[in-house]
Image (cartoon, helix red, strand yellow):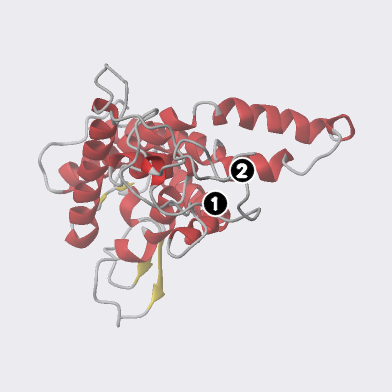
Amino acid sequence: MATGTDPATPDLTAAPGTAPAAGGVRHPSRAAIAARHLRTDRWWLQPAATAAGLLAFVVYSTWRAFANDAYYAAPYVSPFYSPCLAENCVPMKGGADWGLFGSWWALSPALLVLIFPLGFRLTCYYYRKAYYRGFWASPPACAVAEPHARYSGETRFPLILQNVHRYFFYFAILVAGVLTYDAVLGFRDARGSWGHMGLGTLVLLVNIVLIWAYTLSCHSCRHIVGGRLRHFSRHPVRYRMWGMVSALNSRHMLLAWASLVSVAVADLYVYLVATGAFDDPRFF
């Protein structure tokens, strides 16, 4: 019986449940392969592109969140600033201007609401994979060893906070509902009359469709709909809903990126119209 004295043999006499000493894939109990990996393709392109895409969004959203300007161009409101919860919001004709926070809030109203959609995305199962690989190299790609000697998963602070994802899901539903209301208001003109449709209306509609698709494709949503059912035959309605959510869930990565781009494009469009860069093309 092996006793662990052979560097290439694991120590089978160790107490059950105990972790091996630090060393990761370079630990003596692992196969002695000198190369970091045996891949011959350009495996680094995907994590590099992921990091670049997420970094670009972080830079843009940070600028817009602190700008506190040009987020309303009647009848369009930027998704970064809706619902507008501060009293220092610009006047919105029928928009989600609730003014729940007093005049003591002097910062950008976006900082009050972005915590919820960003918290939902930061704790999302796909986005965890994306930034773990893109920024932390944990691991950088399949069949490529990570440089970290220890791995504790999401069992310790701060990564254990990722478990709040299911609660951010409920807030994400509320925010998506408000943005749906904003998209409907896009069918009104600047005077508040219905029957308007401009390019901005389509931009907000596409954005909210993608946001709903991404939100409902969430793993937490799939679990809420049918994760605890033992007999699908006894719950035909929930089973049908679970099947639809599962179909969306299989495209969760695509929907995550598409909705991330759409929300930035929607904000940029409102910004350009609000600053007078161009007039919103009107269809009727």
Nearer to the camera, 147 or 182: 147
Front-lying residue, 262 or 159: 159
Give neighbour class at mark 2: few <14, some 14-19, many 20+ (Cα, 10 Å): some
Residue 4, horizontal then vertical, whole percent: 53, 45
- Judging from the image, what secondary structure is the residue with disc 2 in? helix
Q: Which residue is mark 2?
A: 221
Q: Which residue does the image show at 20% across and 62% down from the upper left?
A: 66
The location of residue 178, given as percent across then percent down, is 47, 51
Residues under numbered marks 1 and 2 in contact, where contact means CB atoms less than 8 Å apart: yes
Which residue is disc 1 drawn over?
Answer: 169
Q: Position of residue 186 (x, y in %)?
A: 37, 41
Three-letter amino acid code at the position of disc 1: Phe
Q: Tell me the amino acid under the disc marked 2.
A: Cys
- The residue drawn where x is 24% and y is 31% is 49
245 displayed left or right of 69: right
The image's mark for residue 138 is none
Nearest the viewer among 8 and 154 is 8
Counting labels gives 2
The quarter holding residue 63 reads bottom left
- Where, quadrant-wise, is the N terminus in this rendering? top right
Question: Is residue 274 shown to the viewer in this render?
Answer: yes
> Residue 200: x and y, percent?
29, 35
Q: Residue at x 19, y 49 (%)?
A: 59
Q: Secondary structure at mark 1?
A: helix
For label 1, count other residues whose C-alpha is less than 10 Å away and answer few (under 14), some (14-19) or many (20+): many
At 44% from the left and 37% from the top, the residue drawn is: 30
- The answer to whether residue 197 shows anywhere in this view is no
**Residue situated in front as seen by the camera: 160 or 29:** 29
The part of the image, by quadrant, that contains residue 142 is: top left
Mark nearer the N terminus (1 vs 2): 1
Q: Split into 4 quadrants, where in the image is the C terminus? A: top left
Q: Please say if 71 is above or below 249.
A: below
